[in-house]
Amino acid sequence: MRCGYQNSHRKHNRETKQLLKNVQGSPMNNGLERLGYSNWQRTVSAENIQAGFSVARVTEVNKNGYVVADGEREMPAEPSGKFLFNAEDGADYPTVGDWVVIQTVDDHSLAVVHTVLPRKTLLKRKQAGRHIEFQLIAANIDIGLVVQSAQSININLLDRYFVMLHDGGIQPIAVFSKVDLLSSSELEDLRSTLSMRHNRYVLISSITEKGVEEVTNLLEPRKTYCLLGQSGVGKTSLLNCLLRTNAFKVSEVREKDGKGRHTTVRRQLICLESGGIFIDTPGMRELGNFDIADGLDETFEDLSSRAQKCRFRDCTHTHETGCAVIEAVENGDIDKSRYENFLKLKKESEFYEMSYQEKRKKEKSFGKMVKNFKKIKKKK
């Protein structure tokens, strides 16, 4: 079964098609194109245009609500009453990068969100703590840049990010910051380690600006990029380098571990002069995933391809006779720590997915009970 948000969106997609018949906004709106409005978005927008509604993109999510941009202006936004009534869970609400249908009020000082347009890609994770729910991070992203400090690389965490991105249909690239703090030998060791993993990566320094041009050359106009990583790894410094300004605050580096304090406090969309679009996200202390079968297969492609040669189709790659994956690990063709991380992520995903489905089942059962109670009450 695919992600829970897909099922909950079927109902909304039917309403979206009806509402889109009333959408205003020329397909050639240059302002919207500057925000990343592509041919894919055009295919899910209406051909019949009627005054009153328009298309906008969510540029910020904060504790007070949303900010949207329609290609001409930015304005605060709030969901309509009908939207709130129809939303079944958090996955139905807008997130940064979403395209939404809005109606402006009070002389364009406020936008009312009526629906979220279908998403091309979606970045999500398990909510922090014991909650078995999705938390949306951003939508309609083309490439995710995962930033880690070159001084303290965590390969297992990097795999976790890559799984999350692949599962959302997003191309991942690893960015290792603060390489100016490494010696020549440490830098060579790092390159050697990374070359064995077949992941696309860039080495940068916000101090010397090494690698910044390489990142800049990756950026294409009207494409959307997302900055991900833990607090203090240099995401904000990289963004300032790309903007050629100190528009975003960077806290002082701690001498103890060489890390900056957490500076990004909300998810926001930023347009670069080059035409690229960036979504900056706060650092994540927890990164749980579930229902990530596609992301696992793509991130651990070397294991997935070996698995095709296993004797049993339902092989778990843990103990079975004739397991091609175990054989590859024993022969040294697959790194043992990589194999162990794969099993850990797979087990964690299966556990959370089972818990999530049980939770959804209970919620549906409770919903039916409430409806039946209302029917009985009406008859009386």
Image: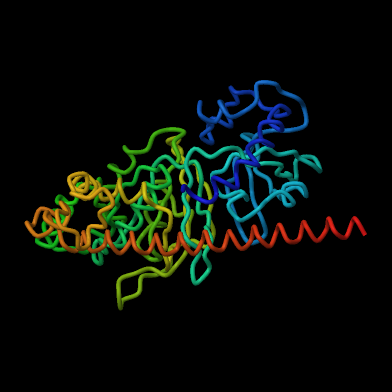
The residue positioned 67% from the left and 41% from the top of the image is: 115
The residue positioned 9% from the left and 60% from the top of the image is: 330
Residue 81 in sight: yes
Residue 253 appears left or right of 141: left
**Which of the two residues, 278 or 353, is positioned nearer the viewer here?**
353
Farthest-out residue, right: 380
Where residue 15 appears, as percent x and y from the top left, is 69, 37
Where residue 5 appears, as percent x and y from the top left, is 55, 49
Quadrant in which the C terminus appears: bottom right
The residue positioned 70% from the left and 29% from the top of the image is: 23
**Which of the two residues, 238 or 283, is positioned nearer the viewer here?**
283
Count of picture labels: 0
The image shows residue 250, relative to residue 7, as above or below, that is: below
Residue 249 in sight: no
**Which of the two residues, 283 or 296, is positioned nearer the viewer here?**
296
Residue 67 appears left or right of 177: right
Residue 105 appears left or right of 183: right
Applied colour scheme: rainbow
The image shows residue 274, relative to residue 368, as above or below, that is: above
Farthest-out residue, bottom: 256
Where residue 158 appears, as percent x and y from the top left, is 30, 58
Where residue 12 appears, as percent x and y from the top left, is 65, 41
The residue positioned 42% from the left and 70% from the top of the image is: 261
The image shows residue 371, relative to residue 166, as above or below, that is: below
